[in-house]
Image (cartoon, rainbow, N blue to C red):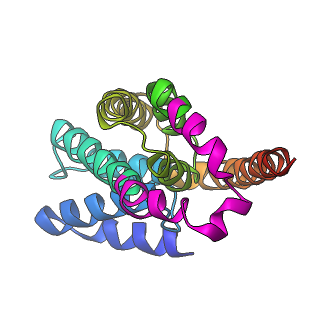
């Protein structure tokens, strides 16, 4: 509902207002806002096809920067606050203190692949990037991998809208279904990890 309303408003705007709203929708989608980033990108790419609409290259740059801003904010919140919370006494039930150094080392080692794969998981990015930030994921591999994945994602939206005629309403239901499935998988993985950590 909110997604449809936001995109309908976006379709009525022109110039700087459209650019600003597109940036905010794309960035906040990566932070966990209730609209799918893939759908926002596809809608933006479609708007760039309108006569007098956004320049395609300018749209790609704007969308790419918005994706990086949203993801970096989630990681920063994890670095800033999650890393403190995970060391609190109440968090020891979920993350035993003796296991924390090993988890942080694993995040340092696999920061790039974790960042790259996370970029393609609808609805889960904000949560996973927050967790990664809480485990002190280093910035350089995160930014490099996330930037590459975001470039692929923006290019796919552009090609889909321009060459294949993709339109966002047709993809809303499949993306929402994928989000639901991935949420259940993430909850299951965290539950199994917590049970194993407790043992």
Q: Residue at x 38, y 49 (%)?
A: 71
- Asked if residue 54 lies left or right of residue 89, the reply is left
Where is residue 168 shown, x and y percent of the image? 50, 51
Q: Residue at x 26, y 50 (%)?
A: 50
- Asked if residue 35 lies left or right of residue 11, the reply is right
Where is residue 136 shown, x and y percent of the image? 43, 44
Q: Nearer the viewer, residue 10 or 74?
A: 74
Where 195 falls versus 6 (above or below)? above
Where 59 falls versus 7 (above or below)? above
Where 145 falls versus 55 (above or below)? above
Q: Main secondary structure of the magenta part?
A: helix
- Asked if residue 74 lies left or right of residue 91, the reply is left
Specify whether residue 88 is painted magenta.
Answer: yes
**Where on the picture, by quarter, is residue 155?**
top left
Where is residue 104 shown, x and y percent of the image? 52, 38
Where is residue 103 shown, x and y percent of the image? 59, 38
- Asked if residue 22 lies left or right of residue 190, the reply is left
Q: State the extent of the magenta-drawn residues as a range.
A: 76-105
Specify whether residue 43 is painted magenta.
Answer: no
Q: Residue furthest front?
A: 98
Q: Nearer the viewer, residue 176 or 117?
A: 117
Q: Residue at x 65, y 70 (%)?
A: 90
Q: Residue at x 48, y 67 (%)?
A: 33
């Amino acid at each position: 509902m909110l997604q449809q309303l936001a995109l309908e408003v976006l379709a009525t705007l022109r110039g700087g207002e459209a650019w600003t709203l597109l940036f905010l929708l794309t960035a906040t989608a990566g932070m966990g806002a209730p609209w799918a980033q893939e759908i926002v990108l596809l809608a933006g790419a479609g708007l760039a096809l309108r006569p007098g609409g956004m320049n395609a290259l300018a749209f790609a740059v704007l969308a790419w920067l918005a994706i990086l801003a949203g993801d970096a904010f989630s990681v920063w919140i994890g670095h800033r606050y999650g890393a403190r919370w995970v060391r609190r006494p109440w968090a020891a039930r979920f993350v035993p203190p003796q296991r924390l150094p090993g988890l942080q080392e694993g995040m340092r080692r696999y920061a790039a692949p974790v960042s790259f794969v996370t970029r393609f998981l609808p609805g889960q990015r904000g949560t996973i990037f927050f967790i990664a930030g809480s485990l002190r994921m280093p910035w350089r591999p995160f930014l490099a991998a996330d930037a590459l994945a975001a470039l692929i994602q923006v290019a796919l939206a552009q090609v889909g809208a321009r060459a294949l005629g993709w339109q966002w309403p047709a993809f809303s239901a499949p993306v929402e279904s994928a989000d639901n499935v991935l949420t259940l998988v993430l909850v299951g993985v965290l539950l199994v990890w917590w049970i194993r950590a407790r043992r």
